[in-house]
Image (cartoon, grey):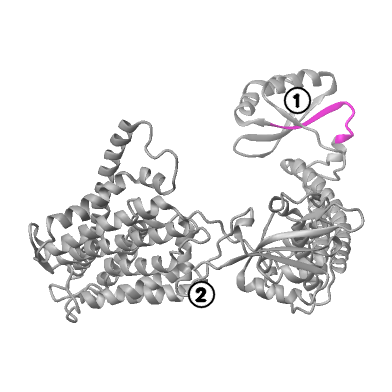
């Protein structure tokens, strides 16, 4: 069902808008519209030109929660009765966040300085570590006057070439240090007078020089140990500062949550100004808010406003005087509410349109049960879906549970439980075995015949729904002359009746009656556009290109007849899946050795799980396809817009 909507215009003094929004609109669900768009004919209206004063502090509080309390809390669970929330004004909330942010900023600066110093030490450590095999004081090397030294690295293959062909021919001392799979770190010493020559030779061998600072003391090993100690001390200090920050936030966690909740609410409330209009007066400026509210809540809202002399509300009953179309708010019984998920996937019904949720819930569950008739597997789907819905509140789980209920019923009708069909006699028939003799066709599986008959009934039902929907929208063509209108109902109902009479061996109506029931509706469908123009009293009834009209009409009529046939036969899949399910379970039992009298229960259990999962998924998709293409396409428009309430969802 779709809730009835009322359009409200709320006004009061401009400075009072925050109080009204916080006191009323956070309590009642209202779908706000742009007031300037709704009140185009009203002169001297303008937008609010104010910046949101709560955004900055709200962003700070959100960052603090994300940085320090992420994963520890569910801030949305903070309730209004929380002691930290009661009595907390938005000003106090902003001040609390500001003070905490400033205190943490000082600690952040201290931490940043320590981290900068730590980075420098780690750089120095990384520079000296490859040379820890050098057993000589680095600071002493740095003071050499007549001997040049070079720290660096050289690729393995060039190092080998240097040692094999060059080293013994030049005056250089090279000390090999650490190495990895690509490089060897070395230190070489050379007399000052030939340093440039040796540097050039080593450079040609891809030697990469490292420049070490003169801050190291002792050998590289001793220097690395000193750096390790300093790094450990700095890391401990950084951890200490980090703990101070966490403790400071933890000690004010409840206050911070309450402040964030309050700031979020007021920031959202302030943003209502984007949809509000205000009068263009210097001293006495008033705001105007417009929106849709359900009839029930609108009555309660107006009753509460009677005690508030500062706020005035006007309710518009005539929707023709309103610029925007009413949004759609679905309200269905609890058992059908999960099926709204499928409705939203296709498109919400327009306001005033028939809500197909209950129809979809019943037909979907019924068809699923028919196609997946097994009492044992049905109970598993029923209980499993129900348990999952209770735990996770998943709409799909509730739908599975409903489908499992109908599967259980059809399981008893088919006499099937976990594939076994000899435990009890079927209350109706065995899908694979039941056959019936039809005139002209011969022997045909009973479930196929029932599935087609069921499809004819569903098609007729959707045609009636289309007429009701079209009457609501005053669509003459779709009501009377369309394929799914009155003309289509007469034709298809006559066709259905004739088929049933013929198949059951009854006498058919007279030829004149059949001509009236078949030919006349088809002529109406063929001339639906001129007939619509005639009823609506348009000046031009027949199109100018009459030849093209008749050619196009002929092919469209042929397509209509073909669609009636194909759409009806589409329901054969309902019976086909009922038979295939029984056949698949027969294969499972055969593989499990049931026929040989030595059942392998592990194979039977795994086979049931496989069929339940795979075929259950396929049947669910096929039923949804039937719903969308064979049912919804006939009567449902799905052009509505969702009711998006400001209020409880933002409070």
* Location of residue 81 with respect to 623 vertically, above or below: below
Q: Check disc 2 and report the residue beneath it.
A: 391
In the image, taking residue 311 as reference, residue 557 lies left or right, namely: left
Q: Residue at x 33, y 35 (%)?
A: 549
The image position of residue 317, as x and y in percent, is: 63, 64
The image position of residue 22, as x and y in percent, is: 77, 68
Q: Are marks 2 and 1 in contact (CB under 8 Å)?
A: no
| Image quarter (top left, top right, bottom left or bottom right) of the C terminus | bottom right
Q: Which residue is most to the bottom?
A: 424
Residue 172's disc number: 1
* CA neighbours of label 1 inside 10 A, class few (<14), some (14 to 19), many (20+): some
Q: Residue at x 87, y 42 (%)?
A: 215
* Location of residue 188 with respect to 456 vertically, above or below: above
- Is residue 411 visible in the rendered image? The answer is yes
- Tell me which segment is drawn in magenta: 142-153
| Label 2 vs 1, first from the N-terminus | 1
């Amino acid at each position: 069902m779709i809730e009835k909507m009322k359009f409200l215009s709320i006004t009061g003094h401009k400075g009072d808008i925050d109080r009204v929004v916080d006191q009323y609109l956070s309590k009642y669900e209202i779908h706000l519209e742009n007031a300037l768009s709704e009140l185009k004919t009203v002169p001297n209206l303008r937008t609010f030109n104010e910046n949101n004063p709560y955004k900055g502090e709200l962003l700070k509080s959100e960052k603090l929660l994300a940085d320090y309390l992420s994963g520890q809390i569910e801030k949305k669970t903070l309730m209004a009765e929380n002691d930290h929330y009661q009595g907390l004004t938005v000003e106090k909330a902003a001040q609390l966040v500001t003070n905490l942010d400033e205190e943490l900023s000082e600690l952040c600066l201290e931490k940043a300085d320590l981290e900068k110093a730590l980075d420098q030490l780690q750089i120095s450590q990384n520079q000296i570590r490859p040379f820890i095999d050098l057993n000589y004081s680095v600071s002493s090397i740095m003071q050499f006057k007549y001997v040049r030294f070079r720290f660096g690295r050289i690729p393995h293959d060039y190092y080998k070439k240097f040692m094999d062909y060059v080293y013994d021919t030049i005056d250089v001392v090279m000390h090999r240090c650490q190495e990895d799979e690509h490089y060897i770190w070395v230190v070489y010493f050379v007399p000052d007078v030939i340093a440039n020559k040796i540097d050039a030779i080593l450079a040609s061998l891809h030697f990469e020089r490292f420049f070490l600072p003169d801050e190291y003391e002792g050998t590289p090993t001793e220097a690395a140990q000193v750096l390790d100690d300093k790094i450990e001390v700095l890391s401990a200090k950084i951890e200490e500062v980090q703990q101070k920050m966490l403790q400071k936030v933890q000690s004010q966690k409840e206050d911070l949550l309450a402040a964030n909740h309050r700031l979020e609410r007021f920031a959202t409330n302030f943003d209502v100004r984007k949809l509000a209009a205000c009068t263009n007066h210097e001293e006495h400026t008033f705001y105007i808010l417009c929106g849709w509210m359900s009839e029930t809540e609108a009555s309660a809202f107006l009753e509460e406003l009677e005690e508030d002399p500062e706020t005035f509300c006007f309710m518009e009953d005539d929707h023709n005087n309103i610029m925007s179309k009413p949004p759609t708010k679905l309200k269905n019984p609890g058992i059908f509410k999960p099926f709204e998920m499928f409705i939203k996937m296709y498109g919400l019904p327009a306001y005033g349109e028939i809500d197909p949720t209950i129809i979809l819930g019943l037909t979907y569950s019924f068809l699923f049960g028919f196609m997946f008739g097994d009492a044992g597997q049905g109970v598993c789907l029923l209980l499993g879906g129900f348990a999952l819905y209770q735990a996770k509140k998943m709409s799909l789980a509730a739908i599975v549970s409903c489908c499992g209920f109908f599967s259980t019923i059809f399981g008893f009708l088919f006499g099937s439980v976990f594939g076994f069909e000899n435990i009890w006699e079927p209350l109706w028939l065995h899908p694979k075995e039941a056959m019936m003799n039809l005139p002209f066709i011969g022997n045909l599986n009973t479930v196929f015949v029932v599935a087609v008959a069921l499809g004819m009934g569903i098609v007729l039902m959707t045609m009636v729904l289309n007429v009701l929907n079209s009457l609501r929208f005053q669509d003459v063509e779709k009501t009377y002359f369309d394929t799914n209108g009155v003309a289509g109902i007469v034709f298809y109902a006559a066709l259905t009746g004739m088929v049933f009479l013929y198949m059951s061996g009854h006498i058919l109506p007279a030829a004149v009656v059949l001509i009236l029931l078949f030919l006349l509706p088809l002529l109406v469908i063929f001339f639906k556009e001129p007939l619509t123009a005639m009823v609506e009293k348009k000046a031009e009834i027949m199109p100018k290109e009459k030849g093209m009209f008749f050619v196009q009409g002929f092919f469209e009529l042929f397509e209509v007849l073909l669609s009636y046939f194909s759409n009806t036969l589409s329901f054969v899949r309902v019976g086909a899946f009922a038979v295939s399910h029984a056949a698949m379970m027969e294969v499972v039992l055969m593989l499990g050795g049931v026929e040989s009298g030595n059942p392998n229960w592990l194979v039977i259990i795994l086979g049931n799980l496989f069929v339940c999962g795979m075929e259950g998924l396929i049947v669910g998709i096929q039923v949804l396809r039937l719903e969308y293409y064979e049912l919804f396409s006939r009567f449902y428009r799905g052009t509505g817009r969702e009711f998006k309430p400001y209020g409880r969802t933002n409070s």
